[in-house]
Image: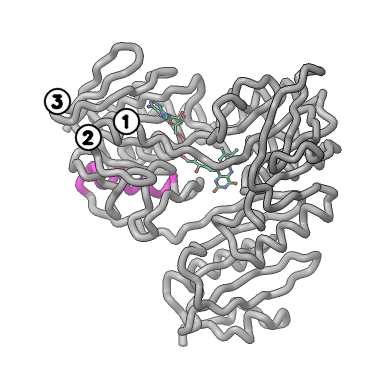
């Protein structure tokens, strides 16, 4: 094997390339990315960058010297348009044909735009990459009032960052609670309170929304439920309306897909020479795409190991974080199957609460922890070891959780 090709130049891609080299692979690595930029951290875009605390230059996942040592052939901005699996080649929009022995699809996701026309409005923005971030930066100083469509993680982070910049923020969510896909009712209630305390207006159950551009300053009118008395005008509208998984090249080439690309625990697709990692890959046990920083990193590593015939299964517990105001919110596990779980809340100072969900055997299945990295670290061990945990000790703020031991 002498030619590994990676499609996408994001987080999963660079971790795969780094692992290939650290595991001794000396052949060619070609990475094809369709952005002008490559290998940078996206999470700060909605946090520190939007707050003006860091610039785009500081987002590099690895220093330039480290990337140079990996000896990657990086083609950018170049888009892979199709995969010819029979001849083991990929085609690009620049008319290149690149042969591969093994191929990794790490194409991530992009901002979902619910109505195509909205993206043509000058003052409607979304945020997935540096280009989007530059567009927002260019406009934001002239904004007094913003409407955010979507009360998911990105919408809420943008709400927190912009309200800190003294912009009046209203969030419109179609569900009857915030972050409904990824957290429980109790955590949604917590988030609602947090944002309202910071003066953000939250409007839930906005089932039908319309946007149109007014003639005055190209400001944007947001209309709820076709009600002419329910129209508010904003300087800028931010779309935090979910992600579109970039699985098109996999579909076109006949790989097995559903909401994303189907892979096994070794990140291998239905074609043994093609792997997928990161946002685009469906988690083998959970059955959906986990769109998180740590998932992209770990799957990138596992995919690289698999390409080198080292079978190391991907077994990480899903973990993601979000920063809103002074709260670092960490989520461990998935809320997908916690129906019969018992909720135990460990209250913290300044509303820094932890929400533990224990199954019938008192094993921790899911945790949301606010400003408590220590507990998250311990909980990762509890989940891995499947320790039963006494709910009473979790509740008891005077009990040192470090003392929890296997029964
Ligand atoms: C604003 C923002 C904030 C976030 N905050 C957090 C957070 O706080 N915590 C957390 O856990 N996660 C967060 N995430 C999610 C995290 O950044 C992603 O899960 C992670 O970047 C996914 O990595 P990836 O390698 O799968 O995809 P990406 O990093 O998206 O890289 C994929 C790359 O492939 C390119 N591409 C797509 N199709 C093609 C093609 N056909 N040819 C060539 N190139 C292609 C894409 O343009 C992109 O550059 C955030 C994401 C965003 C956008």
Label 2 – label 3 distance at C-alpha: 12 Å
Pointer 1 residue: 249
> Looking at the image, is mark 2 or mark 3 earlier in the sequence?
3
Relative to 316, residue 200 above or below: above
At x 55%, y 42%, the residue is 242
Percent of width and height locating residue 62: 50, 34
Nearest to the observer: residue 201 or residue 162: 201
Q: Nearer the viewer, residue 71 or 74?
A: 74
| Marks 2 & 1, CB-CB < 8 Å contact | no
Q: Which residues make up the magenta segment?
A: 296-309
* Secondary structure at numbered mark 1: helix
Rendered location of residue 182, percent (x, y)? 55, 57
Disc 1 crowd rating (10 Å Cα; few below 14, some 14-19, many 20+) is some
Up/down of 235 relative to 92, above or below: below
Is the residue marked by circle 3 packed among few (<14), some (14-19), or many (20+) residues within 10 Å? few
Q: CA distance from mark 2 to mark 1?
A: 16 Å
Residue 87, numbered label: 3
Residue 120, labelled with which disc? Answer: none
Q: Which residue is label 2 attached to?
A: 102
Q: Secondary structure at mark 3?
A: loop
Judged from this view, the residue extending furthest toward the left is: 86
| Mark in front: 2 vs 1 | 1
Magenta-drawn stretch, dominant element (helix, strand or loop): helix
Q: Position of residue 61 (x, y in %)?
A: 51, 35
Height in image: 362 above or below 329? below
């Amino acid at each position: 094997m002498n030619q590994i090709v990676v499609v996408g130049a994001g987080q999963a891609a660079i971790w795969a390339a780094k692992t290939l080299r650290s595991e001794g692979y000396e052949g060619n690595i070609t990475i094809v990315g369709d952005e002008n930029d490559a290998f940078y951290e996206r999470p700060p875009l909605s946090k520190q960058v939007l707050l003006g605390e860091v610039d785009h230059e500081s987002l590099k996942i690895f220093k330039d010297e480290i990337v140079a040592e990996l000896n990657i052939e990086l083609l950018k901005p170049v888009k892979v348009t199709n995969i010819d699996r029979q001849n083991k080649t990929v085609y690009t929009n620049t008319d290149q044909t690149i042969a591969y022995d093994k191929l990794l699809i790490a194409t991530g996701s992009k901002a979902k735009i619910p109505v195509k026309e909205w993206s043509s409005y000058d003052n409607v923005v979304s945020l997935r990459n540096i280009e989007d971030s530059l567009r927002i930066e260019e406009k934001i100083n002239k904004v007094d009032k913003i409407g955010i469509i979507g009360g998911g993680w990105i919408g809420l982070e943008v709400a927190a960052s912009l309200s800190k910049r003294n912009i009046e923020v209203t969030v419109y969510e179609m569900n009857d609670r915030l972050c409904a896909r990824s957290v429980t009712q109790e955590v949604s209630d917590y988030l609602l309170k947090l944002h309202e305390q910071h003066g953000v207006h939250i409007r839930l159950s906005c089932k039908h929304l319309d946007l149109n551009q007014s003639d005055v300053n190209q400001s944007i009118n947001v209309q709820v439920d076709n009600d002419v008395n329910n129209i508010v005008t904003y300087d800028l509208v931010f779309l935090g309306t979910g992600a579109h998984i970039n699985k098109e090249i996999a579909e076109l080439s006949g790989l097995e897909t559903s909401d994303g690309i189907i892979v096994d625990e070794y990140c291998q697709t239905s074609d043994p020479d093609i792997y997928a990692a990161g946002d685009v890959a469906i988690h083998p046990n959970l059955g959906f795409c986990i769109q998180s920083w740590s998932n992209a990193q770990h799957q990138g590593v596992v995919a690289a190991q698999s390409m080198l015939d080292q079978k190391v299964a991907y077994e990480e517990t899903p973990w993601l974080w979000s920063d809103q105001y002074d709260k670092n919110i960490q989520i461990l596990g998935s809320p997908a199957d916690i129906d019969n779980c018992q909720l135990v809340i460990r209250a913290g100072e300044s509303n820094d609460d932890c929400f533990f969900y224990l199954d019938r055997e008192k094993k921790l299945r899911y945790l949301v922890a606010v400003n408590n990295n220590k507990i998250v670290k311990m909980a990762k061990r509890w989940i891995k070891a499947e320790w039963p945990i006494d709910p009473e000790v979790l509740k008891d703020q005077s009990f040192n959780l470090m003392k929890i031991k296997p029964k």
